[in-house]
Amino acid sequence: MNIVQVMLSGDGAMANHVARLARHLRLAGHDVLVVANSDVIANHDVGDAIDIPARRSGTQLRLLKRLVRNSDVVHAHGRSGGLLAATLLTERHRPAFVVTWHAKPEMGLLLGQSAESFGVRLADAVAVTSPDLIDLVKKAGAKRPWLSFVPSPRVPELLRTPRLSPEERAGLRHELFATLPEVASPGHDLDPMRPIVLTVSSLIPRKNVLTALEAATAMRDEITWVLVGRGDMSIDDQLRLGAISSRAPLVLAGERGDVDRWLAAADAFALPSVWESRPLAVQEAMAAGVPVVATRTGGIPELLDGAGLLFELDDVAGMVGAVRRVLDDPPYAQRLTEVARDRIGEQMQYPEIAQLWARRYEMLVAARQKEG
């Protein structure tokens, strides 16, 4: 099949997903062209691609229309990608068209006759990355709503890595703390003998990481809370100032290339996000055998049911209680992590995901041929 993948902008997880999906579809014998902006093409190995500038001329749009008209399937990712693809596919005789939503949109943007919902209404199928989005896209006019989970490519290797003993984790903490600059721990001296609670997250409002500061403050004499990630500098400033004023044992490790080692050293993993689909960081913690506590939101309950602990949004006491439970009851934490590793080990990886999408594409192409 001739397949066009469209993604104008998006976070790194979406771009990495499109790159891996395209690669495995090509390995399966399909011709795949990625339409994306220059940043995506420059920073991700997407293969054959066309750069779509922010300001598009009539000539460029006509070229795009010819490309998509001669394809079998157009698969758009994200709101902007779906909108662009929809504007190119308004003719009656057109390729099969799929849109994937990788994040929860604002209700006002999805419902009604808004431009952003146009792609959902025109698409032959709409895939979503979290079960709670199925009803939303149905209300927006989706003809075929599908689930489309995005796996972390790190999971297989993490599953093959044995879990360290408590003594080995303490030794690794010594090593990792030695790599941190002094400014990484603004509020509290580092104590490698204390358990680590790890959060891997971008510093953006949706990730709600300021609640991790509150939780770390509440557990001041019990743990060291390590936050790996970067993003909004105003959030970084709030975390630093809050840690100084509260003497919280919060470590701001920044962006790291050794997340796997921090997972190996961690005694618990916490994610306080406002919304997530199937967060890659949680998948990786599950594969690494780290007990996970996370917000009851989006696709997290389906992922963690019986394999981790859930707390309500902004419930700092609930998050603290969940962390304490897995730290204070090692046999219970062990049972959770065994279920978690088994569950995450059963999820599809990219070769199987590419096969699934190829079958879906073939079904949609056949349906359009019948209509035509």
Image (tube, rainbow, N blue to C red):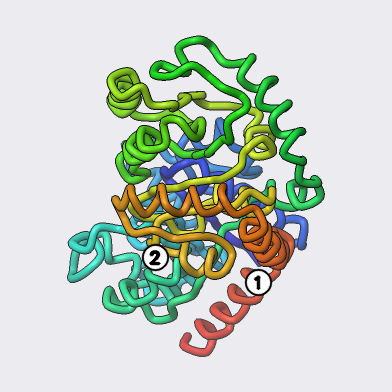
- Residue carrying label 1: 356
Taking the spot 34% from the left edge, 72% from the top edge, the residue there is 137
Q: Which sits in the foreground, 345 or 262?
A: 262
On screen, residue 133 above or below 364? above
Question: Which of the 4 image quadrants contains residue 299?
Answer: bottom left
> Which quadrant of the rendered structure holds the N terminus?
bottom right
Picture coordinates of residue 339 (x, y %)?
67, 66
Q: Residues within 10 Å of mark 2 (few under 14, many from 20)?
A: many
Is tag 1's residue or tag 2's residue first in the polypeptide sequence?
Answer: 2
Picture coordinates of residue 369 (x, y %)?
54, 84
Judged from the image, the secondary structure of the residue bearing numbered disc 2 is loop
Residue type beneath disc 2: Leu
Picture coordinates of residue 209 (x, y %)?
37, 39
On screen, residue 197 above or below 331? above
Q: Residues within 10 Å of mark 1 (few under 14, many from 20)?
A: few
Picture coordinates of residue 351 (x, y %)?
74, 61
Residue type beneath disc 1: Leu
Judged from the image, the secondary structure of the residue bearing numbered disc 1 is helix
- Residue carrying label 2: 89
Q: Is residue 32 visible?
A: no
Q: Which sits in the foreground, 231 or 125?
A: 231
Number of residue marks: 2
Extreme-top residue of the structure: 182
Distance Cα–Cα, label 1 vs label 2: 24 Å
Taking the spot 48% from the left edge, 75% from the top edge, the residue there is 146
Taking the spot 57% from the left edge, 35% from the top edge, the residue there is 196
Camera-near label (1 vs 2) is 1
Taking the spot 65% from the left edge, 76% from the top edge, the residue there is 359
- Label at residue 159: none
Q: Which sits in the foreground, 345 or 180?
A: 180
Extreme-bottom residue of the structure: 370
